[in-house]
């Protein structure tokens, strides 16, 4: 069995956990990844409709971040009006099982977490 490298959580720039969660652990990125995992390829407006409560500006920022990290790809078709499609890359697809585990955990524990929040 391979030894796991010890992670130094105190160095923000070099900590994989902090670095990665900072990039896609925001309010929208995980939803975008999950939706693209279900739908495979979506245009901007289709993605915005599936999320519902995201502004055009915030979706644009989120998509640019995810594209910069290599989690999604953006394909522009040379036509008028312009057609742009988004889909998960292989790297994004490799993240899906982990996110599905998180979704399952959230679904199983949300009621207890909500109850705990009401006590505080």
Image (cartoon, rainbow, N blue to C red):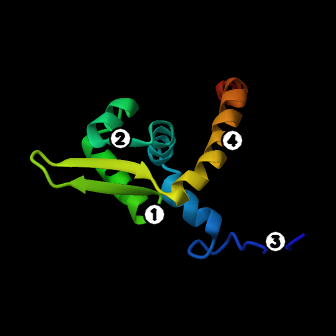
The CA distance from mark 1 to mark 4 is 21 Å
Rendered-image quadrant of the N terminus: bottom right
**Sequence-first tag of 4 and 2:** 2
Residue bearing the label numbered 4: 101
**Horizontal relation, residue 20 to residue 44: left or right:** right
Pointer 4 and pointer 3: residues touching (CB < 8 Å)?
A: no
What is the total number of numbered labels drawn onto the structure image?
4
The CA distance from mark 4 to mark 3 is 21 Å
Q: Residue at x 78, y 75 (%)?
A: 5
Between tags 2 and 1, which lies in front?
A: 2
Q: Nearer the viewer, residue 25 or 91?
A: 91
Residue 26: x and y in percent read: 48, 49
**Sequence-first tag of 2 and 1:** 2
The CA distance from mark 4 to mark 2 is 23 Å
Residue 82: x and y in percent read: 15, 48
Q: Residue furthest front?
A: 78
Pointer 1 and pointer 3: residues touching (CB < 8 Å)?
A: no
Determine the image quadrant of residue 81: top left
Q: Secondary structure at mark 2?
A: strand
Question: Which mark is drawn over residue 42?
Answer: 2
Q: Nearer the viewer, residue 116 or 95?
A: 95
The CA distance from mark 1 to mark 3 is 25 Å
On screen, residue 66 above or below 47: below
Between tags 4 and 2, which lies in front?
A: 2
User: Quick check: can you spot residue 113?
Assistant: no
Residue 110: x and y in percent read: 67, 28
Residue bearing the label numbered 3: 4
């Amino acid at each position: 069995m391979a030894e796991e490298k010890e992670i130094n959580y105190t160095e923000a720039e070099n900590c994989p956990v902090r670095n990665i969660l900072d990039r896609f652990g925001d309010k929208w990125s995980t939803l975008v990844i999950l939706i693209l995992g279900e739908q495979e390829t979506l245009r901007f407006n289709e993605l915005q409709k599936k999320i519902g409560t995201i502004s055009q500006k915030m979706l644009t920022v989120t998509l640019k971040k995810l594209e910069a990290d290599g989690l999604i790809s953006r394909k522009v078709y040379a036509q008028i009006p312009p057609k742009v499609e988004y889909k998960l890359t292989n790297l994004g697809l490799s993240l899906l099982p982990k996110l599905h585990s998180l979704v399952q955990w959230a679904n199983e524990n949300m009621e207890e977490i909500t109850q705990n929040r009401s006590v505080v």
